[in-house]
Amino acid sequence: MGRGPEDPDRLLPRADYRVDDVWDTVGLRGTGSNDVVVDDAFVPEHRALGFGPVTALRVPGHEINPEPLYRLPYAAVFTTTIATPLVGIAEGAYESYAAATRERFRVSYGQKVAEDPFAQVRIARAASDVDAAWLQLTRNMRELYAHAERGEELPVELRIRTRRDQVLATERAVAAVDLLMENAGGNAMRTGPGPVQRAWRDAHTGRGHAANDPERALVMYGQCALGIPVHDTMA
């Protein structure tokens, strides 16, 4: 059901913004990540919330919503939700590659690709990257949630570690897909619904998201480890 322009949960009336259809990309085409353009519109103060209070975990909603989920750091939750589908993409690419490789025959070398030790090594490395990414992502979110559930202050070291592991999960996902794509053969490069090349396009497109900037996240972790205060709003 549509909402009227005066509904209290609407940031802006529909007439005050437009959606520009600009999402014409090589990957992640289904996300429809178009631009929302607001030009000379008034936003009431009670409908705005800055990064400062969000990062400090001091927001008005805490007064009425006791759920632990809403006491997790925005940066940790948001960036993890950006990395998670990319790891899933890499896992899907791995499964598709392994299934296809069991049946592939490489004429140039006169052997089944499944018997090629170099292909076997790529499979092992890709699988390890995917496993490492999942293990760190799930560990960090479990620990954050457990602290919030107990009503404890969230350790800054854990928050920063979550950002470190999130961005490296994306890096591992892209590396895993690259390993497989490089050994998938010419058929995998054909345009169309091929799962490995689609995963390759999607993973690289997702890597470009601002949340997946490795240097910014890793600098924060290095600063924290060395006792330097971290002031980044995405910590």
Image (cartoon, grey):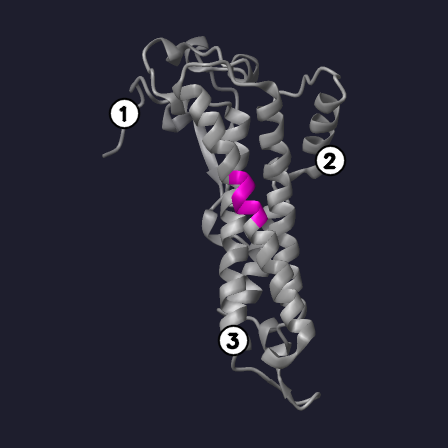
Q: Earlier in the sequence, mark 3 or mark 2?
A: 3
Residue type at the position of mark 1: Gly
179 in relation to 156, above or below: below
Residue 79 in picture, x, y percent from top left: 55, 34
Residue 136 on the magenta span: yes
**Residue beneath label 3, please?**
100
Given contact means CB atoms under 8 Å apart, are the residues at marks 2 and 1 in contact?
no
C-alpha span from label 2 to label 1: 43 Å
Q: Secondary structure at mark 3?
A: helix
Q: Which region is colored magenta?
A: 132-137
Q: Which residue is mark 1?
A: 4
Does the segment drawn in magenta span residue 216?
no
Q: Position of residue 164 (x, y in %)?
A: 64, 34
Please say if 219 is above or below 148.
below
Could you tell me if residue 70 is visible in this image?
yes
Q: What type is the residue that disc 3 sits on?
A: Ala
Q: Residue at x 49, y 60 (%)?
A: 92
Q: Earlier in the sequence, mark 2 or mark 1?
A: 1
Q: Closer to the camera: disc 3 or disc 1?
A: 3
Q: Do tag 3 and tag 1 residues touch (Cβ < 8 Å)?
A: no
Q: Residues within 10 Å of mark 2 (few under 14, many from 20)?
A: few
The amino acid on which the numbered mark 2 sits, given as a three-letter code, is: Glu
Proximity of marks 3 and 2: CB atoms separated by less than 8 Å: no
Q: Quadrant of the N terminus?
A: top left
Local secondary structure at mark 2: helix
